[in-house]
Image (tube, helix red, strand yellow):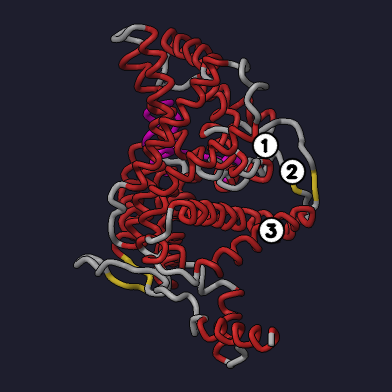
Amino acid sequence: MSHSVFRTQTSSFLQALPPSLPVGPHSTRSPLAPWQITASTTVYFSLTSVLMIGIQLFLLVPMRLAWKQCIAAPVLASLFALPLVLVSIESPAIQLMHGGACVAVVMRMFDLYFVTPLRTGREPVMDFDEWRREMWRTLRHIPVKEKKKQGEDKKASDSKAIGGTQRRYNTRQSQRHNASSPLVQDHGSVLTPSPSKGNLCHWTSYLPRYIFYVSVVEFSTFVFSFMTVDQIHNLSLVPRFFFIVSLAICIICFISLWYYSNMFCWAILTGELIDDTDWTYVKHGFPLFATSPDDFWKRWHHMFQYIWVDLGLKPTQFLLRKYVIDKKRVHHKTAAVLEMVLPVMSVFVLSGLMHEYMFLTTWHNNSAGYMMAYFLIQGVATLASKGLQIVLGRRFAGVVPVALWVVLTVLFNAATGALFLEPIIQNGGFFMGARQSVLVRSYNHLRAQGVF
């Protein structure tokens, strides 16, 4: 009797399964604007690649600054506009990756061609060694040779933008600020490669971590494929909390897979061992175990951090010192607060603008400010958590268990992460990886063959 009931229940369960996955659309897109045109992935990728590679190779060409800027300006404008005009007909995921790559290159090259010369006087001309380090910088920090580093330090000290007394004053102010502000000190530590060697490992030693990331992404994508947007919106508080956390973990693991895949390819092609002081992303702790918003961004904010720091934090510091602090327009205590708050917030504003742009190029509608709101709240929380650490010091370090800080940080990130993920959920973004999922494709194949 029990065996018959079990078979009946199993049969009912299999019949209730959807005929194919995902049950919802791969994504929803707004109608194309009059200026938008569809293009194949080959055309889209070719055009963006030519512009991205060209503007980066142009750094090797010795030329007067004004001429280089006149040539770089229309190229960067075209690279910025291309994802807004061309629409990939294959997949929003391809559009998302292309849009992210384009805006990252635009921001970095705009800094090198326009902002850095204005701020430091350094012209956008590199030798091959500098250029090679710049191209790898998103993934790998190549150590600078000692003689090369001394030459760069001398070049920076002889910058035309800051002269004599003003430069010495700014240096003293910068040293004083860096000593009192761990926020800026933390950013700098990421940008400066360690001269000492770290742990040298064969790439296969990272395979268990890679397999773990693959398993998480595959399982999460498979489970998400059974859900529709309406079902997610109708979830109660606790299930919705776990869904948001699961989706966030899936995104983190997916980006980690992209990074580790590049690292593995480099190690296999060169036959060299992996140094975890060069591949800084390898050494980071999993963001889920962060003990504060500040700790969270230290663990996660690696790949494009140097872009936002060089284009946001440093120019904001430069402008504050030049037009506010040096001219003593405000009280020195107010100036110290401004110099700590505004540069850090500029990094989060740039990050918010970048994600708003990526969302617009992928789904052709705005995110109603969700992305920017998320990064602004995270920026304020990062400053607040760092401020509490400075004020309270280590007084409560051993009193409050670390596990409690982790739980509180997870709850905060889940609450604010709902802002980041809401426009993605509304547009079915969690379906984007369904076509590539092995589990989803296996399920569809078995259902089509009538296996169950």
Q: Residues within 10 Å of mark 1 (few under 14, many from 20)?
A: some
SS under mark 2: strand
Of pointers 2 and 3, the one earlier in the residue sequence:
3
Front label number (2 vs 3): 3
Gap in Å between the C-alphas at discs 1 and 3?
Answer: 30 Å
Task: Give percent across and percent down for residue 128.
Answer: 58, 44
Q: Residue lying furthest left in this view?
A: 34
Q: What residue is drawn where x is 69% and y is 88%?
A: 1
Residue 50 visible from this viewpoint: no
Which of 347 and 370 lies nearest the eye of the viewer?
370
Q: What residue did someone put label 3 on? A: 212
Mark sitting on residue 302: none
Task: Give percent across and percent down for residue 119.
Answer: 40, 27
Q: What segment is highlighted magenta in the picture? A: 109-131
Q: What residue did someone put label 2 on? A: 275
Of pointers 2 and 1, the one earlier in the residue sequence:
1
Residue 41: quarter of image: bottom left
- In this rendering, the answer to whether 425 lies above or below 369 is below
Q: What residue is drawn where x is 71% and y is 54%?
A: 209
SS under mark 1: loop
Residue 1 visible from this viewpoint: yes
- Please state which amino acid type lies under the numbered disc 1: Pro
Gap in Å between the C-alphas at discs 2 and 3?
Answer: 21 Å
Q: What residue did someone put label 1 on? A: 143
